[in-house]
Amino acid sequence: MFISSLIADSIRLIQKYLLKEKHLNFITKIHKNGLLAAIIFAVIIIGSVYGMNHIELTEYNLTTDKIDNESYSILFVSDVHYGTIQDTQLVKDSILKMNKLKPDIIVLGGDIVDERTTEEEMQEIFEEFGKLNSTYGTYYIFGNHDRQPYSTDYENGNRTFTNSDLNQSIEENGIKILNDDKITINNDIVLVGRSDAAWEDSVNRIDVDEILNESDLSKYLIVLDHQAVEDEENAKEDIDLQLSGHTHGGQMFPYGMMYDLTGRLNYGEYEFGDMKQIISSGLTGWGWPMRNEAKCEYVLININ
């Protein structure tokens, strides 16, 4: 409402001092009784609800001289927060669309579930992702919400599933967990999956160079890290691509703008030397069932 009032005041000042158009005097009337701010507020809310209920594909094309004869497509999905603020059928419909992309590699980038996800919903979403077809499999990294660490966010004051339940559901659906671990794909690509950088895990995180060895360095190196951290350090280790989520692209104004003003990475494609970093705004969002910054998305990255 505060932002709506600021916009309404700005419109009134422009009309009064810059345009000076008499036929726009109706703006003065609806501004005086507060109707202009209310209209702007309604437009913002309607637009934000629309934003949360429409999921789009975002595509990036990258090139490398580390891969000679092949090209690869990576489907990257993060921040689903399944069963909390977005229609679950919308998520399922999006997964059907993802399958039509026929990616080579699928990466689930964390926060697929959170503290308000029930055990049944947790099992359901991993069954859905387990149906996705790819050439080289589906890989999973933990976000800061997946293991339900934030007790203040519990729906009923208690966790709805254990870490063991979560791991079992992921693995039973043919999804491989990478937690400070790596896997080599077709002798071309190395995926390095990091543990989440939230404070409760940070003491256990190891450096990327401890995960890699000399034989990996000639391959195309991809770091999967839920939070967009350690980018400069990863670039120094000759990482080619870092994939992250977590920020939701701000989700609601002015959070994205605050990220940008403070110099924090927020959304889209960034460069650190020879390393590319892609941050997804996520399939859903968190907290509010609204979005007016960035968009709900799943990401396809083509490496040529």
Image (cartoon, rainbow, N blue to C red):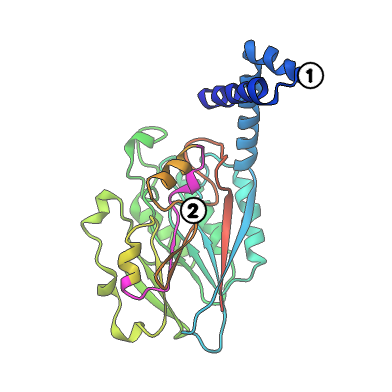
Q: Residue at x 38, y 36 (%)?
A: 153
Q: Residue at x 59, y 45 (%)?
A: 88
Q: Residues within 10 Å of mark 1 (few under 14, many from 20)?
A: few
Name the amino acid, label 2.
Tyr
Query: Considering only vertical position in the picture, is 249 above or below 138?
Result: above
In the orientation shown, which residue stands out farthest toward the left?
203
Along the line of sight, which residue is nearer the eye, 281 or 200? 281
Q: Residue at x 74, y 16 (%)?
A: 26
Residue 193 visible to the viewer: yes
Along the line of sight, which residue is nearer the eye, 220 or 122? 220
Residue span colored magenta: 236-253
Q: Position of residue 63 (x, y in %)?
A: 53, 77
Along the line of sight, which residue is nearer the eye, 218 or 179? 218
Q: Residues within 10 Å of mark 2 (few under 14, many from 20)?
A: many
Q: Position of residue 112 (x, y in %)?
A: 47, 52
Of the residues under marks 2 and 1, which one precedes in the sequence? 1
The kind of secondary structure element at disc 1 is helix
In the orientation shown, which residue stands out farthest toward the bottom?
69
Name the amino acid, label 1.
His
In the picture, the quarter occupied by the N terminus is top right
Q: Residue at x 42, y 41 (%)?
A: 258
Along the line of sight, which residue is nearer the eye, 171 or 7? 7
The kind of secondary structure element at disc 2 is loop
Assess whether residue 298 is covered by the magenta stretch.
Answer: no
Query: Considering only vertical position in the picture, is 196 above or below 149?
Result: below
Q: Quadrant of residue 149?
A: top left
Q: Cα distance, mark 2 to mark 1?
A: 42 Å
Residue denoted by label 1: 23
In the drawing, what numbered circle is on residue 267? 2
Q: Position of residue 91 (x, y in %)?
A: 60, 50
Horizontally, residue 75 falls left or right of residue 54, namely left
